[in-house]
Image: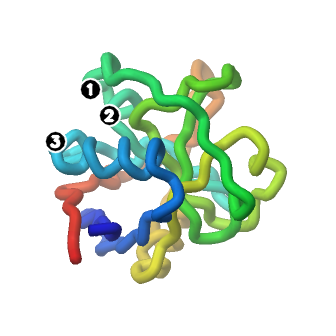
Amino acid sequence: MNKVVLVTNMGSITVHLHDDMPITAGNFKNLVKQGIYDGVLFYRVEHGFVIQAGPEGSGRDASIPTIRDEFTSHNRNSRGTIAMAKTDQPNSASSEFYINLVDNNRLDSNYSVFGEVTSGMDTVDKIGRVETVLDEATRMHKPLQEVKIAKAELIR
């Protein structure tokens, strides 16, 4: 099973996970199986950049272990790809992820792309257009309306 569906309150997003990303895609699949993404928010919406979700940004469990960075020759942060968010330190990705709203190839050498949206890009774009407010503390744009992943599940 190399597909995950993210059922959100704005529609569903289906993501195909790259087979040649065993660390990153494997981590994401394991977190989906554990229900880690159920009920988490897309807490960051940067118009013309990315939408980002995960338990830490949603105020949930921040104790999920980090994973080693993993890059392939096709590591491109292009529109519709999904990648692990992390700090500016190497090997600091854990459970936070983002979906690229546009080509963000300046991120290619630092952020591991582990899949791509195969259906539901209209939902991604809809989330990417919600009204936001800048959170001065984090310097991130937060949606004014709740955008939640009701359920994340592996599909065939």
**Dots 1 and 2: beta carbons under 8 Å?**
yes
What residue is disc 2 on? 55
**Dots 1 and 3: beta carbons under 8 Å?**
no
For residue 51, say whether it is visible. Answer: no
Q: Position of residue 68 (x, y in %)?
A: 54, 30
What residue is disc 3 on? 34
* Amino acid identity at mark 2: Pro
What residue is disc 1 on? 60
User: Which element type, helix, strand or loop, lies under badge 3?
Assistant: loop
**Position of 105 compared to 117: left or right?**
right
User: Height in image: 32 above or below 61?
Assistant: below
User: What's the residue at 22%, 77% (across, down)?
Assistant: 156
Picture quarter with the N terminus: bottom left
Q: Within the image, what quadrant is residue 14 found in?
A: bottom left
User: Which element type, helix, strand or loop, lies under badge 2?
Assistant: loop
User: Which element type, helix, strand or loop, lies under badge 1?
Assistant: loop
Q: Position of residue 22 (x, y in %)?
A: 45, 49
Which one is closest to the eye, mark 1 or mark 3? 3
**Position of 38 compared to 43: left or right?**
left
Q: Could you tell me how far apart the alpha carbons at marks 3 and 2 are, in whole angstroms?
A: 12 Å
**Dots 3 and 2: beta carbons under 8 Å?**
no
Q: Position of residue 101 (x, y in %)?
A: 62, 65
Label 3, residues with CA under 10 Å away: few <14, some 14-19, many ≥20 = few
